[in-house]
Image (cartoon, rainbow, N blue to C red):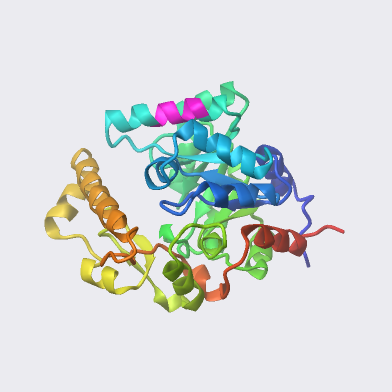
Amino acid sequence: MTPRLENEAVRLFLTHARVETPLICGPMYPCSNPELVAAVSAAGGLGIVQPISLTYVHGHDFREGLRLISRLSGGKPIGMNALIEASSESYKRRMEQWVTIALEEGVRFFVTSLGNPKWIVDRAHAAGAVVYHDATERRFAEKAMAAGVDGLIAVNKHAGGHLGGLAKTELFVQLQDLGVPVICAGGIGDEKEFVHALEIGYAGAQLGTRFIATDECKAPQAYKDAICRATADDIVTTERLSGVPVAVLNTPSVERLGRTAGPIARWMLKGRKTKHWMRTIYGLKSIWALKRGLGRDAPDKDFWQAGKSVASISSIEPAGDIVRRFARAVSTD
């Protein structure tokens, strides 16, 4: 049976996001370029801005980047991602500035990741905005609920990039009684998987890998082609990019880098203070590798994040076509 959009959780999410289709283009470093974010929103989904991607990778002033996306989308709603783990005071100040600018520019949907989202919840609610928080298991969801979030992004074990450890049904069972919309993130590459997530009871879905293989995404062509060729078995996890497991396509560069943290790094990652230092080191290394990878002839050009949804992705398409096709799959007419 095709799930109807009159489902209470779906309806609430659509109200929160101010969109027509319960579909999010998840924030992706480095793949969230303005053209991709705008194309998803223009088609009736919700594109999410990733600030570091917008400013560092794609070279836009943050405010002007938001205005560009608004022009490209015809003024449709967009969201903003805030990674809020306090790795440094300078980063926290920069994130506070980005949130302020986003609110001034009319952004009313925020996706928070890591850390305590309370300060963003307070700022967002004062401006009439909502906050959804990434959660990989119930204990993290409960902390986010205590901070007052309006919804949850349930990141399961099939997600690309930073992933969880539970299957999508198992994770939904853990979170379904918390009284807020729960969005499925991970393992959705086609309409069948989208419909299944809504039938489980999710209020919507967040896609990342599927939107990389689009015309608008500025990821390297080789990256897009690799997604279209890959099977689920081609997805592996490595701790060497950020200090925590990240799902990537298994490539020669990943094999050279390795998949597990060394003994010193592992010791540092266990400390309350030293874990931030180690994650900063990993982050700088991955940014350096990515910067080299942006060059056409760079040797380390295939650190490519992706999830198990590659199994159902076989073509590069316009992002808007994907949104509209998914919308038809849950049509209520």
Give percent across and percent down for residue 282.
24, 51
Per the image, is 306 magenta?
A: no
Among the 4 quarters of the image, the one containing residue 130: top right
Q: Toward the viewer: 31 or 182?
A: 31
| Residue found at the far right of this picture | 333
Tell me how many marks there are: 0
Among the 4 quarters of the image, the one containing residue 256: bottom left
> Which quadrant is the N terminus positioned in?
bottom right
| Residue found at the far top of this picture | 126
Residue sitting at 51 percent across and 61 percent down?
212
> Which quadrant is the C terminus positioned in?
bottom right
Q: Toward the viewer: 186 or 175?
A: 186
Q: Tell whether 276 sits left or right of 8.
A: left
Give percent across and percent down for residue 99.
48, 29
Segment colored magenta: 95-101
Residue sitting at 63 percent across and 51 percent down?
39
Q: Toward the viewer: 240 or 322?
A: 322
Compared to residue 136, the image places residue 68 above or below, namely above
Give percent across and percent down for residue 97.
42, 26
Residue 180 can be seen in this image:
no
Residue 33 can be seen in this image:
yes
Residue sitting at 42 percent across and 61 percent down?
165
Give percent across and percent down for residue 37.
57, 48
Q: Tell whether 78 sits left or right of 44.
A: left
Q: Toward the viewer: 215 or 213?
A: 215
Compared to residue 286, the image places residue 54 above or below, namely above
